[in-house]
Image (tube, rainbow, N blue to C red):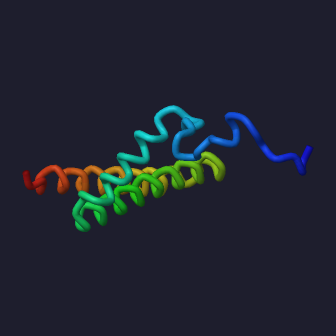
Amino acid sequence: MPGKPVSGPEAKANPKTLKNPLPGTSTMQSLKQQYIKETDDAIKAIDVYLLFCILNGVFQAIYYLLAGSFHYNAFLGGFISSVGSFVFAGTHILTNISV
């Protein structure tokens, strides 16, 4: 009944005390909050660039699969460039970690 007030345990349920519907959601939320709070802005910028390299390679692979293999050399050059950029940017992060 839509007009009937809720009674019992449903009335006392607090959204903060309810369990998350997906396992690991609280872990991901705490990881995200810690990343935002403790990560330097320069590392965040490099992380965004790494995400761009991954998405660029994925989009090139999808286009290659949809359009056909006529331009295989162009695909290969672009994809290897994305992978190389990702590797070199990741190496830059590893060599500049300050402890």
Q: Is residue 45 above or below residue 88?
A: below
Q: Position of residue 70 (x, y in %)?
A: 59, 51
The foreground one among 11 and 82 is 11
Seen at 67% across and 34% down, the residue is 9
Q: Would residue 76 be found to the left or right of residue 69 on screen?
A: left
Q: Residue furthest top?
A: 23
The foreground one among 92 and 2 is 2
The foreground one among 55 and 39 is 39
Q: Would residue 91 be found to the left or right of residue 20 on screen?
A: left
Q: Quadrant of residue 43?
A: bottom left
**Which quarter of the rendering shows the N terminus?**
top right
Q: Residue furthest left?
A: 99
Seen at 35% across and 46% down, the residue is 31
Q: Would residue 64 be found to the left or right of residue 95 on screen?
A: right
Q: How many marks?
A: 0
Seen at 58% across and 45% down, the residue is 14
Q: Residue furthest right?
A: 1
Q: Position of residue 53 (x, y in %)?
A: 39, 57
Q: Position of residue 18 (x, y in %)?
A: 57, 38
Q: Position of residue 25 (x, y in %)?
A: 49, 40
Seen at 87% across and 46% down, the residue is 4
The foreground one among 74 and 57 is 57
